[in-house]
Image (spheres, helix red, strand yellow):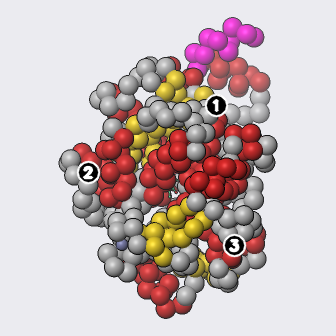
């Protein structure tokens, strides 16, 4: 049973049939999926959700499909880690890390949006799926297409991390590197989508794709014991995830699944590509495009499609925007790894690096609950750490050599035990 009614323009409210459409013909506003929330409220209770498999489809009534999902059945329900060690370092009381660095199958939150977009693309009869990507979307489209027997074309800026390119080609996808920024790749893909009629998950079927991000927020609320956090810090590229997390909380309140408590929503970007944060700090919602220059390539979108709505989401919630420099990104990646044993990609360094600055400036209250959104895996962006961490000492396979190494290291704890 489907509760998806139609597509609706976010600006003028005009309704459209649930097809491969994404912009309003009249006002050029973005289209969004509209649901029968009254119907959903009659079937979707905490008990029903808790009785289901631990994956993102436990909230399927709130996802935009006519039938049952067919792609990415194991995606989601990643750990919400109570980060007490990191909390101690930061001097905060209640801190959590939502860890999509271990999302199945390609170790980023993009597996959520892709499983929804591709399930929907199949329902609509598409044979070829495609995307413009900053890396993680490429990995996920390629893997999920192979798993469900679809053909995929993936377009990326040619200077992406080698791991992300290899981690797309390995699935047998048609990968095309473009000499240009993501924004140029995206513009080309809009033309290709019009001419070739493929399902570009983040372009012509974007309204369905974007809804998949809500499950990230739904899970946080459920994993907190059916409660909302007081603060959440979200990394932003195109700015879709942050708006959909806010939407997911709103839906749960509306359905009576959680109490109506406020959450301040904070957006994080790299200083080398922070058009949305610049707008928030400048006190307006108008996004001025930038030319990206940062190691956080997965977030390097200079002209973010949902920039305006994400700025509004932060400001209306009482939150704020912050950015982290490349050095701050790297030290935050290391801090998260050293305190919580979580190796996040550069985007995770952006989230934690920005959170640290938001705590220092008092924008986030240290006594309130805080969730940090970790959206991708550090094994995919190891290049960022090359030359930043010294190699390990190398010794002969001899106990004597090891003894002298321990002695010379001055590690009294280790020597005391011998
Ligand atoms: C795509 C991506 C995001 C943010 O995506 P939005 O375009 O803002 O929805 C965040 N983190 C990582 C690792 C990503 O790949
Ligand atoms: Zn409109």
For residue 405, say whether it is visible: yes
> Is residue 175 shown left or right of residue 148?
left
- Residue 138 versus residue 44: which sits nearer the camera? 44
Q: Main secondary structure of the magenta part?
A: helix
Does the CB distance between marks 1 and 2 fall below 8 Å? no
Does the CB distance between marks 3 and 2 fall below 8 Å? no
Residue 225: image tag? 1
How packed mark 1 is, by other alpha carbons closer than 10 Å (few <14, some 14-19, many 20 or more), is few
> Is residue 69 shown left or right of residue 408?
right
- Residue 215 versus residue 301: which sits nearer the camera? 215
- Image quarter for residue 323? top left
User: How far is the residue under mark 1 from the one under mark 2?
Assistant: 35 Å
Q: Quick check: is 415 in the magenta stretch?
A: yes
Residue 145: image tag? 3
Outermost residue, top direction?
Answer: 416
For residue 107, say whether it is visible: no
Residue drawn where x is 75% and y is 11% of the image: 418
Tag 1's secondary structure? loop
Residue 411: image tag? none
Instruction: Give the mark nearer the N terminus: 3 vs 1.
Output: 3
Residue at disc 1, CB closer than 8 Å to ligand 1: no
Q: Which residues are magenta?
A: 409-418
Residue drawn where x is 59% and y is 19% of the image: 408
Does the CB distance between marks 3 and 1 fall below 8 Å? no
Residue 232 screen position, x and y as percent: 46, 38
Residue carrying label 2: 278
Q: Regarding ligand 2, which quadrant of the image does it lie in?
A: bottom left
């Amino acid at each position: 049973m489907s509760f998806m009614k139609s597509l609706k323009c976010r600006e003028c409210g005009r309704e459209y049939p649930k097809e491969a459409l994404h912009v309003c013909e009249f006002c050029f506003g973005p289209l969004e999926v509209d649901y029968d929330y009254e119907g959903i409220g009659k079937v979707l209770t905490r008990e029903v959700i808790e009785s289901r498999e631990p994956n993102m489809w436990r909230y399927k009534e709130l996802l935009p499909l006519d039938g049952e999902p067919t792609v990415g059945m194991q995606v989601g329900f990643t750990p919400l880690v109570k980060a007490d060690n990191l909390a101690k370092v930061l001097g905060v009381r209640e801190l959590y890390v939502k860890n999509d660095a271990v999302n199945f199958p390609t170790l980023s939150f993009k597996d959520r949006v892709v499983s929804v977009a591709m399930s929907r693309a199949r329902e609509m009869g598409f044979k070829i799926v495609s995307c413009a990507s900053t890396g993680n979307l490429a990995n996920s489209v390629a893997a999920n297409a192979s798993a469900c027997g679809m053909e995929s074309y993936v377009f990326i800026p040619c200077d992406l991390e080698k791991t992300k390119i290899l981690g797309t080609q390995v699935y047998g996808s048609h990968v095309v590197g473009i000499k240009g920024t993501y924004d140029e790749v995206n513009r080309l893909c809009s033309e290709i989508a019009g001419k070739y009629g493929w399902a570009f998950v983040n372009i012509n079927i974007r309204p369905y794709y974007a809804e998949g991000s809500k499950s990230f927020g739904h899970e946080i609320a459920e994993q907190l014991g059916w409660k909302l956090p007081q603060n959440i810090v979200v990394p932003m590229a195109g700015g879709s995830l942050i708006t959909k997390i806010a939407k997911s909380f709103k839906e749960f309140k509306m359905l009576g699944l959680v109490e109506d408590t406020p959450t301040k929503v904070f957006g994080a970007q790299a200083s080398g590509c922070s058009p949305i944060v610049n707008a928030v700090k400048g006190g307006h919602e108008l996004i001025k495009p930038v030319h990206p220059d940062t190691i956080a390539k997965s977030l390097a979108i200079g002209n973010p499609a949902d920039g305006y709505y994400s700025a509004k989401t932060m400001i209306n919630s009482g939150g704020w925007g912050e950015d982290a420099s490349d050095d701050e990104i790297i030290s935050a990646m290391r801090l998260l790894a050293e305190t919580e044993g979580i190796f996040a990609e550069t985007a995770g360094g952006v989230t934690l690096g920005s959170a640290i600055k938001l705590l220092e400036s008092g924008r986030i209250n240290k006594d309130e609950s805080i969730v940090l959104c970790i959206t991708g895996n550090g094994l995919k962006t190891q290049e960022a750490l090359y030359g930043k961490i010294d190699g390990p000492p190398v010794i002969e396979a001899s106990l004597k050599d090891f003894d002298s190494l321990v002695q010379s290291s001055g590690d009294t704890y280790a020597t005391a035990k011998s």
